Image (cartoon, rainbow, N blue to C red):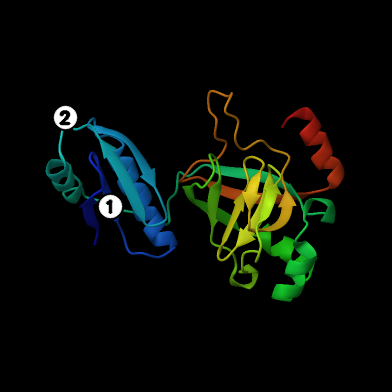
Amino acid sequence: MIGIKLYGNNALLINFEQKIDAEIHEIVKAYYDKISGFGEVIYQIPAYCSITVVFDKVITDFENLKSKIEKLKITTDKTKSDAKVIEIPVCYDSEYAPDMESLSKEIKLSPEKIISMHTSGTYDVYMMGFLPGFPYLGQLPEELECKRKATPRKQVAAGSVAIAGKQTGIYPTDAPGGWQLIGQTPLKIFNPLSDDAFLIKMGDKVKFKSISAETFKTLQKNGK
């Protein structure tokens, strides 16, 4: 069941069940893919459980586009996935993980266990925001769920890998942030000078791989 409402002068908002959920994510992706083929649509902004659809008022209007979307036949198959899996190397050494020690005490798991659990699964890229190229990944194992920092940092280094709530993510650029920092990747996940600025996109999957500080520095030096 979906809800569609007018969202500004030339956009509509599709709302799905309001929770972070893998099945809802598959439905969001299915609608996004179908709507991507609509000539009257300028662009879409998918989120955890909604899609903002911006349309060309010269070609269509809210009621016509709403009706067209409501008539879509959407099917999902969790057993099949053509999602791109991106491996992200991460150094979890203390030099790159300023919150690992305090987080270990908070959630009562050793750093080794945190690393093991963080690298054990494959994460869905639910959405992109709040910075260009910042992927919201989920869901974390329940044991790794944690609070954001009480006081956000004024500066988080680009490539920092962090967790908060049920989510994990990667800071694409130097920026303020309040998530718990548990590692860093040497990869550039956002490069505005590249033809394809974003390494990771909504609908992809991410797998983290633990690397040594030496490997981190080598990859960083080589620009990979």
**10 Å crowding of disc 1: few (<14), some (14-19), many (20+):** many
As helix, strand or loop, the secondary structure at mark 2 comes to loop
Instruction: Tell me which residue sits at (83%, 56%) in the image.
Output: 94
Task: Residue under label 2, please give it.
Answer: 59
Q: Is residue 10 visible?
A: yes
Instruction: Tell me which residue sits at (77%, 35%) in the image.
Output: 220
Q: Is residue 77 visible?
A: no
Q: Is residue 220 left or right of residue 172?
A: right
Q: List x then y, in percent, for residue 8.
A: 25, 44
Q: List x then y, in percent, for residue 22.
A: 44, 60
Q: Amino acid at mark 1?
A: Ile
Mark 1 or mark 2: name the one nearer the start of the chain.
1
Q: Is residue 214 above or below residue 117?
A: above
Q: Which mark is residue 14?
A: 1
Q: Is residue 117 above or below residue 90?
A: below
Instruction: Tell me which residue sits at (17%, 47%) in the image.
Output: 66
Q: Is residue 27 left or right of residue 136?
A: left
